Image (tube, grey):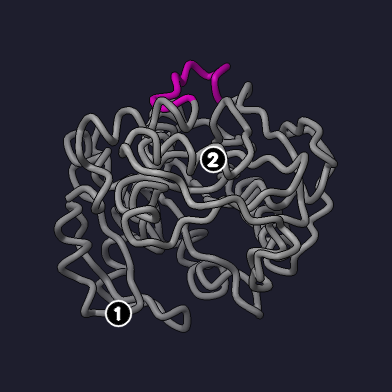
Amino acid sequence: MTKTFFIFGAGYSGRAIARELAEVTDFVGGTTRDKAKFGVLEAAGITPFVFDGSNLSQSAAEALSHTTHLVVSIAPEQNGDPVLNVARETIKGAMPALKWICYLSTIGVYGDHAGGWVDETSSCNPVSERSRKRLEVEEEWLRLGEETGLPVAVLRLSGIYGPGRNAFANLAAGKAQRIVKPGQVFNRIHADDIAGATAHLARRFERGIFNVTDDAPSPAPDVVTYAARLMGIEPPPETPFEEAGLGPMALSFYGECKRASNARLKATGYRMRHPDYRAALDAMWAEGNWRAENS
């Protein structure tokens, strides 16, 4: 069967997904707002298209008419999801080959659970405005699936890292911090597992909500300490949370604490490539691919 993917928002995660799909698909298209980034997309095996959130080009519409798998990795804007705003009717009436839709969301939709475990059945009480919008858009995509009869998978991602975006890179750049807030933990997800999980769920035409996250929610300073040990350098000093001088977005992350379970994803047969930050950092250090995004 011919498989063609189209990725709205071929950023860091979208490019990782495209590289994963390179050998098993006939075509991967992807969008960027900036034509100057076409080369970056092409290096990841993506045929690039411009999408500014206000209209759909004729060339993108033509590619969508042959698309079997649609991946959406664009954050909501003030007036909602730009893909739904512009392409809803295209999806409903001009994509006859479409078999599966994937929307990349965030575990931020759960809000604060005082360090408790959350799964896909847990209550969602998002704290930040961006997470509230994410939850609204999730519901819109799931409704579109019901209207069209298409399987829609919502992937709730935790903190994304990988080549070029990790504690090694932060340490090398002198930007790493060990911010200590007692009891605070975060889940993470390596870009390889975002890509691997997306490809796995696409093969199975899975529908519903999946937490795409690691096995080991951990305090942020532990990650920096472990990376520094691998690099053979001293980690930066610990900084109390109250003295860190964080900006509004970082403060919102520290205002929520939860432990996200990936049991539902694993129940589909997916095996985590990097089950925790130690395994991921060990692999990146051994392979030497931590400095820059994979090409």
| 71 and 215: which is toward the camera | 215
Which quadrant would the N terminus be assigned to in this image? top left
Q: Is residue 158 left or right of residue 15?
A: right
Magenta stretch holds residue 267: yes
Q: Is residue 75 left or right of residue 202?
A: right
* Residue drawn at 60 percent across, 35 percent down: 210
Give the CA separation, mark 1 to mark 2.
28 Å
Task: Name the disc covering residue 239, or none.
Answer: none
Classify residue 198 by image quadrant. Answer: top left
Say whether disc 1 or disc 2 marks the residue closer to the N-terminus.
1
| SS at circle 1 | loop
Classify residue 26 by image quadrant. Answer: top left
Q: Which residues are magenta?
A: 265-275
* CA neighbours of label 1 inside 10 A, class few (<14), some (14 to 19), many (20+): few
* Residue drawn at 22 percent across, 48 percent down: 294
Q: Amino acid at mark 1?
A: Asp
Magenta stretch holds residue 156: no
Task: Name the disc covering residue 188, or none.
Answer: 2
Total numbered circles: 2
Q: Single out the residue that lies furthest toward the bottom.
A: 54
Marks 1, 2: nearer the viewer: 2
| 220 and 73: which is toward the camera | 220
Reply above or below: 161 against 134. above
Q: Amino acid at mark 2?
A: Arg
Residue 182, percent across and down?
A: 76, 43
* Residue drawn at 30 percent across, 69 percent down: 60
Residue 143, percent across and down?
A: 68, 52
Task: Name the disc covering residue 34, or none.
Answer: 1
